[in-house]
Image: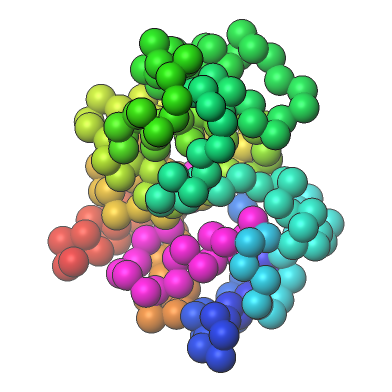
């Protein structure tokens, strides 16, 4: 991403152009206070927010917004907007032409949803719906996965399940972005942090060293 500036109507959400390069196998946490531009950035990345300046490339190739929708998958904070099928199992492969049913069932098992595979998604709890959306993103086989508050409504055990699955996705060469306020989830899952503040990308650092870990801890202490 090069010289990105985001707008929402006449208002600039991301005011100052910035550059980001993400490598396969990275899990990047996106942090910042409410209104900092995190969700708008995520939607622009996957092609859902079209009002921006700059260039977004994947493997050095520039894609249109529509083309990026086929490369990226966004799990929204309110997953009710992403539930369409009549059964949980069907939801996992909704709109996907080629899928492996055994893989679908295995993903449901890993997220504690197998016993609900024949249930209607709307009968699930909020946390279960969140896990179902995560399952669907995995089955989609998209190269770039973006999760907006994926641990919202999840208990600790479910958070760890999601974290382990994201580790598997990284090992498979996916690029994962997480918009989250969950410090423990970040520590368990992310390799790098993008910090937005008042429409500006203020910091970009890795969590593989103590300096990065201290910056992250300081942000959450000061909230």
Where is residue 186 shown, x and y percent of the image? 34, 45
Can you say which quadrant of the picture contains the C terminus?
bottom left
Residue 185: quadrant of the picture: top left
Task: Let me know if residue 33 is in the magenta part.
Answer: yes
Task: Let me know if residue 155 is in the magenta part.
Answer: no
In the displayed structure image, the side of residue 207 where residue 93 appears, left or right = right
The foreground one among 209 and 133 is 133
The residue that appears at 47% across and 15% down in the rendered structure is: 117
The residue that appears at 16% across and 61% down in the rendered structure is: 221
From this viewpoint, which residue is outermost toward the bottom? 10
The residue that appears at 60% across and 14% down in the rendered structure is: 103
In the rendered image, the vertical position of residue 97 relative to residue 108, given as above or below: below
In the rendered image, the vertical position of residue 205 relative to residue 172, given as above or below: below
The way the protein has been coloured in the rendering is rainbow
In the rendered image, the vertical position of residue 217 relative to residue 44, given as above or below: above
Where is residue 46 shown, x and y percent of the image? 64, 56
Residue 44: quadrant of the picture: bottom right
User: Can residue 70 be spotted in the picture?
Assistant: yes
From this viewpoint, which residue is outermost toward the left? 221
The residue that appears at 54% across and 66% down in the rendered structure is: 41
User: Can residue 29 be spotted in the picture?
Assistant: no
The foreground one among 79 and 4 is 79
Q: Which residues are magenta?
A: 27-46
Residue 64: quadrant of the picture: bottom right
Where is residue 26 shown, x and y percent of the image? 55, 43
Can you say which quadrant of the picture contains the N terminus?
bottom right
Where is residue 2 shown, x and y percent of the image? 68, 71
């Amino acid at each position: 991403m090069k010289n990105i500036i985001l707008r929402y109507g006449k208002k600039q959400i991301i005011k100052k152009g910035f550059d980001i390069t993400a490598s396969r196998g990275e899990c990047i946490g996106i942090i910042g206070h409410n209104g900092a531009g995190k969700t708008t950035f995520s939607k622009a990345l996957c092609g859902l927010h079209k009002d921006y300046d700059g260039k977004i490339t994947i493997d050095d190739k520039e894609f249109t917004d529509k083309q990026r929708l086929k490369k990226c998958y966004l799990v929204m904070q309110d997953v009710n907007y992403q539930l369409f099928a009549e059964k949980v199992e069907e939801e996992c492969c909704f709109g996907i032409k080629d899928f492996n049913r055994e893989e679908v069932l295995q993903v449901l098992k890993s997220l504690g949803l197998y016993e609900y595979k024949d249930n209607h998604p709307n009968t699930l709890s909020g946390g279960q719906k969140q896990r179902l959306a995560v399952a669907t993103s995995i089955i989609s086989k998209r190269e770039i996965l973006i999760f907006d508050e994926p641990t919202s409504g999840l208990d600790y055990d479910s958070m760890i399940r999601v974290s382990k699955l994201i580790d598997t996705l990284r090992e498979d060469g996916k690029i994962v972005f997480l918009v989250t306020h969950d410090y423990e989830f970040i520590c368990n899952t992310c390799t790098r942090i993008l910090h937005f503040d008042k429409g500006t990308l203020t910091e970009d650092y890795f969590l593989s060293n103590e300096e990065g870990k201290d910056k992250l801890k300081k942000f959450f202490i000061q909230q």
